[in-house]
Image: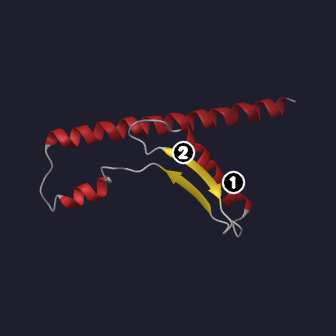
């Protein structure tokens, strides 16, 4: 982050903050973030024991998944996305409200 602009640094820090707010069984858990001596921002996330969706699909080697499995994964993704959008909405709403308050004073 040493070579990052102020805007890039702020965006990276906001990403870490955003990840820390997302708590849901279908979202990889945020553990911590820190800037190391090498100047990089590290974001430590939980381990996905079952692997990732891409790998699961690749393992199929062209064989179609059972409908039950597709529906189950779709529901999990939709629920995780709902949490993500809710957190983003809260942050945007908070920023708009604090901006409006600052303008009135």
**Badge 1: how crowded within 10 Å, few (<14), some, or many (20+)?**
few
Q: Is residue 23 left or right of residue 3?
A: left
Q: Quadrant of the N terminus?
A: bottom right
Given residues 102 and 11, the one toward you in this image is 11
Left or right: residue 36 compared with residue 27: right
* Above/below status of 66 relative to 61: above
**Which residue is located at x 58 percent, y 58 percent?**
42
Q: Which residue is mark 2?
A: 19
Q: Position of residue 76 (x, y in %)?
A: 33, 38
Q: Secondary structure at mark 2?
A: helix
Which element is circle 1 on?
A: helix
Quarter holding the C terminus? top right
Task: Tell me the residue at 69%/66% (across/down).
Answer: 37
Earlier in the chain: of badge 1 and badge 2, it is 1
Q: Is residue 71 above or below residue 65?
A: above
Q: Residue at x 59, y 33 (%)?
A: 90
In this rendering, the count of numbered labels is: 2
Q: Nearer the viewer, residue 75 or 21?
A: 21
* Residue 47: x %, y % from top left: 41, 51
Residue identified by numbered label 1: 10
Percent x, y of residue 15: 59, 50
Task: Tell whether label 2 touches label 1 (CB within 8 Å).
Answer: no
How far apart marks 1 and 2 lie (CA) works out to 14 Å
Disc ID at residue 26: none
85 left or right of 66? right
Q: Position of residue 2 (x, y in %)?
A: 71, 68
Q: Residues within 10 Å of mark 2 (few under 14, many from 20)?
A: many
Q: Where 74 sits versus 40, above or below?
A: above
- The furthest residue to the right: 105
């Amino acid at each position: 982050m040493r070579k990052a602009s102020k805007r890039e640094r702020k965006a990276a820090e906001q990403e870490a903050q955003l990840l820390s707010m997302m708590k849901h069984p279908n979202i990889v858990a945020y553990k911590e973030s820190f800037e190391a001596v090498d100047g990089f921002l590290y974001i430590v996330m939980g381990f996905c024991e079952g692997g990732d969706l891409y790998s699961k699909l690749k393992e199929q080697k062209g064989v179609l998944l059972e409908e039950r499995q597709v529906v189950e994964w779709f529901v999990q993704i939709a629920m995780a996305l709902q949490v993500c959008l809710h957190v983003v909405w809260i942050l945007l709403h908070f920023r708009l409200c604090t901006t409006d308050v600052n303008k009135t004073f």
